[in-house]
Image (tube, grey):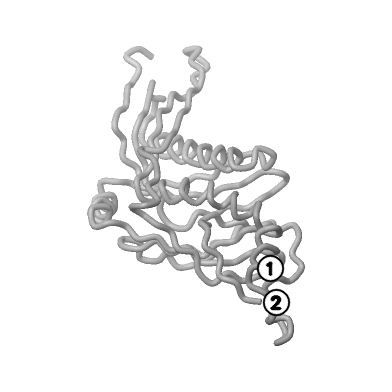
Amino acid sequence: MNRRIFFVLTLIFLFGIVPFAANAQVQEQSRQLRILVWADLDAFPGSFEENTEAEKKNTDKEGEDQFHRMFGFAIERTKQVAPFLLNGMINGWKFEYTPYDKRRGVKEFWEFDEIKPFDKNMNPIEFHDPEAMDGKLLSRAYCNRTRQQQIEYKRWCSIVHPHIKGVGRGSVEKEFDGIKEACSMALKEAVRQYWRTLEKNKPKEISGTVLLIRDPRIYVRNGQYVVDLDFFLETDRIIKYTQF
């Protein structure tokens, strides 16, 4: 029974040894974000299989109730995750970073947050073509940028914004917070690795903003979410130590 599900899903769950980008080619994202996505299902008794004509006579209401009992957790989880990831791709994230410095006795400090909340009325998400595959729910999520957001995206794409990338991890037991933690750690690694190539000495403090680009690559390994992300970077401030 093919069912149309209208809920938000942009997180790619791929449970295996090797992460897999759902769309191998980077799509043109200046106007519309289109992401092929997965959601893992612990129990999946064939709700997306074709029914016989007799079975199709059952009421749609009964089928929908059964569907939501089976997939309610996945739906609620993706409603949390989707705005978070799309916000990183549309409005961006901000960060502040103080690198660890043993010689100076400086502890590492890291903080990141959304630049502004995701507005689902401004950027509604459509969820298309749900399909069952290998115990997972495959679907396509669409979200359009506004005209002003298209202009802002083109600004981000200029050569003055370097492309950085990083991998982060977060505990599966933390659920959605574990995903956010993994994204945060991926961004921290990306910022740290980039500035290591430019600065011989550790800066005292770095702050800036990033725009999440390409498809987020998120999978699970050894009880942890593993996130592989790409960004455009805009550095707002670098404070250097005056004494060495």
Report the disc number at residue 148: none
Q: Which residue is mark 1?
A: 62
Report the disc number at residue 58: 2
The picture places residue 55, in percent across and down from the top left corner, at 73, 81
Q: Is 106 placed left or right of 118 in the picture? A: right
In the image, residue 11 sits, relative to residue 3, either above or below, namely above
Residue at left 50%, top 69%?
128
- Residue type (three-letter) at the residue carrying disc 1: Glu
Residue at left 55%, top 62%?
37
**Toward the viewer: 99 or 132?**
132
Q: In the current view of this chain or complex, which residue is farthest to the bottom? A: 53
The picture places residue 81, in percent across and down from the top left corner, at 53, 48
In the image, residue 124 sits, relative to residue 210, either above or below, namely below
**Toward the viewer: 76 or 93?**
76
Q: CA distance from mark 2 to mark 1?
A: 7 Å
The picture places residue 139, in percent across and down from the top left corner, at 55, 67
Q: Is 52 placed left or right of 74 in the picture? A: right
The picture places residue 142, in percent across and down from the top left corner, at 43, 63
- Residue type (three-letter) at the residue carrying disc 2: Asn
Q: Quadrant of residue 145?
A: bottom left
**Circle 1 sits in a helix, a strand or a loop, which is it?**
helix
Residue at left 46%, top 38%?
193
Residue at left 65%, top 59%?
68
C-beta proximity under 8 Å, tags 2 and 1 = yes
